[in-house]
Image (cartoon, grey):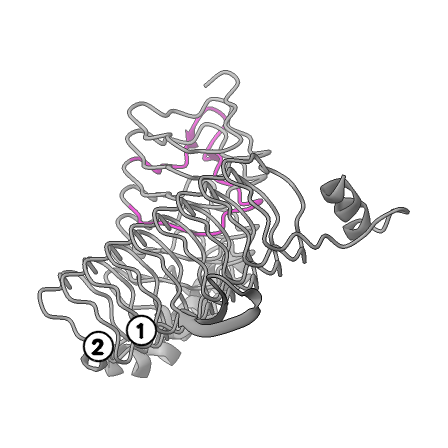
């Protein structure tokens, strides 16, 4: 009844009331899919509770016991998790943008006098052994948390506050950590293979025994200095497209670091552009015309390609983890009355990609890694997915594939 009244309150219907569920034992309870936005659940026990896809945005979870809770794909944006225990919890693909995991001040009743005599002590956020694979932790406050042996594989942690956090033996493989604060953090024995660490001074953290293979740091001064040159090449490609080949020429960015271009390629006409092996992490290519573009083995993690036209593009082996492909077109590109170029994404990494409403008609996704990809509303007729890893993929319907 309380939850039903809360959901009426949140949706503005009559008879609603904001839920106040402090100090409640919810052990093992199934609250999956429920709307608990702004609810007060402080100091409650949610041990092993199921909260899959629940909306807990701005919820008060101060001091909660969430050990082994199932919070997959839950919305915890701006949630208050100070002093909460998430040991062993599953938060894969959860949205924890600007969530607060800082130390909490906990009141403890006297063993015999009860609430008439309270003592106070600080409790660290406990994330030990939790699973955050593919989660969004951008801007989260995780100062001094304990995250021993925690799995942050493919997380987005841009601007997260991780100073003095204990992340010993944590797995941060492929994590996007641009501008995160890791000063004083313990990263001893951590796995940071292929992590993106732009704007981070790794020397401010303890990294003894950490695996830093393939870490992507800030763009070189040469790449920054060439940004205007690269932009001019893109403009020449656009002129070539608009003039039917009479002016300009297709751009070649093979193996270049294009990150300093940031949003300068947005909505541009870059058909048949070549960027094999280019570093394009975090670029905004929304609305861009990339028909027939050659992007094989490019690093495109976190790229925004929303609404982009990628018909016939070659993306074999490209790394597109956490990219935004919503409403993008990756269908076939007509070459003549009886010839087409199919979108080629074989061996591509598309983990945790947003592909809602995308057109993947006839696309080649053989041996692609699409774990956690959201295909809701996508058109995939005739797509080829031989050997593709589809575990945890959402909205997956392929009539005629």
Write down the residue under mark 1.
198
Q: Is residue 176 above or below residue 52?
A: below
Distance between the alpha carbons at the discs numbered 2 and 1: 15 Å
Horizontal side, residue 372 vs residue 306: left or right: left
**Residue 214 spot, x, y in % from top left:** 17, 61
User: Which residue lies at the image location 46% right of the left edge and 47% below the top edge?
Assistant: 291
**Residue 115 spot, x, y in % from top left:** 58, 65
Q: Residues within 10 Å of mark 2 (few under 14, many from 20)?
A: many
Q: Depth check: 125 or 167 in front?
A: 125
Q: Is residue 239 visible?
A: yes
Horizontal side, residue 168 vs residue 244: left or right: left
Is 335 one of the magenta-colored residues?
yes
Q: Is residue 160 visible?
A: no
Corner quadrant of residue 29: top right
User: Which residue lies at the image location 46% right of the left edge and 49% below the top edge?
Assistant: 66
Asked if the residues shown at circle 2 and circle 1 are in contact, with their CB atoms under 8 angstroms apart, the answer is no
Is 73 one of the magenta-colored residues?
no
Write down the residue under mark 2.
205
Stretch in magenta: 318-346
User: Which residue lies at the image location 52% right of the left edge and 56% below the top edge?
Assistant: 288
**Residue 360 spot, x, y in % from top left:** 49, 34
From the image, give the main secondary structure of the stretch colored magenta. loop
Q: Depth check: 148 or 205 in front?
A: 148
Q: Is residue 366 above or below residue 401?
A: below
Q: Depth check: 256 or 205 in front?
A: 205
Horizontal side, residue 279 vs residue 67: left or right: left
Mark 1 or mark 2, which is nearer the start of the sequence?
Answer: 1
Q: Quadrant of the C terminus?
A: top left
Q: Which residue in the rendered view is the most extreme toward the right?
A: 14
């Amino acid at each position: 009844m309380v939850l039903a009244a809360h959901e009426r309150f949140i949706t503005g219907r009559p008879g609603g009331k904001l839920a106040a569920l402090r100090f409640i034992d919810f052990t093992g309870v199934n609250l999956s899919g429920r709307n608990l936005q702004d609810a007060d659940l402080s100091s409650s026990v949610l041990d092993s509770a199921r909260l899959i896809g629940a909306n807990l945005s701005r919820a008060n979870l101060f001091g909660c016991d969430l050990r082994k809770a199932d919070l997959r794909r839950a919305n915890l944006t701006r949630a208050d998790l100070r002093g909460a225990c998430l040991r062993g919890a599953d938060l894969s693909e959860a949205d924890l943008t600007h969530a607060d995991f800082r130390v909490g001040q906990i009141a403890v009743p006297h063993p015999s006098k009860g609430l008439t005599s309270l003592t106070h002590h600080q409790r660290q956020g406990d994330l030990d052994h939790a699973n955050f694979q593919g989660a969004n932790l951008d801007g989260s406050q995780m100062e001094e948390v304990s995250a021993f042996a925690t799995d942050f594989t493919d997380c987005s942690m841009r601007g997260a506050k991780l100073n003095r956090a204990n992340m010993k033996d944590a797995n941060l493989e492929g994590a996007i950590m641009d501008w995160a604060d890791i000063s004083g953090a313990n990263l001893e024995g951590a796995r940071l293979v292929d992590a993106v660490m732009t704007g981070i001074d790794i020397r401010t953290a303890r990294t003894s025994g950490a695996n830093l293979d393939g870490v992507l740091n800030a763009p070189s001064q040469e790449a920054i200095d060439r940004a205007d040159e690269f932009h001019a090449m893109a403009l020449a490609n656009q002129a070539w497209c608009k003039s039917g080949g009479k002016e300009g020429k297709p751009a070649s960015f093979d193996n270049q670091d294009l990150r300093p271009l940031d949003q300068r390629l947005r909505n541009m006409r870059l058909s048949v552009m070549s960027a094999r092996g280019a570093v394009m992490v975090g670029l905004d290519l929304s609305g861009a015309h990339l028909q027939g573009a050659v992007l094989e083995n490019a690093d495109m993690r976190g790229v925004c390609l929303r609404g982009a036209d990628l018909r016939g593009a070659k993306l074999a082996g490209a790394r597109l983890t956490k990219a935004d492909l919503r409403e993008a077109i990756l269908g076939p590109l007509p070459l003549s009355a009886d010839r087409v170029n199919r979108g080629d994404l074989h061996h591509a990494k598309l983990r945790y990609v947003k592909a809602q409403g995308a057109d993947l008609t006839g696309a080649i996704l053989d041996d692609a890694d699409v774990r956690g990809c959201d295909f809701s509303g996508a058109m995939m007729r005739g797509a080829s997915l031989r050997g593709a890893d589809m575990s945890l993929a959402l909205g997956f319907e392929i009539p005629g594939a």
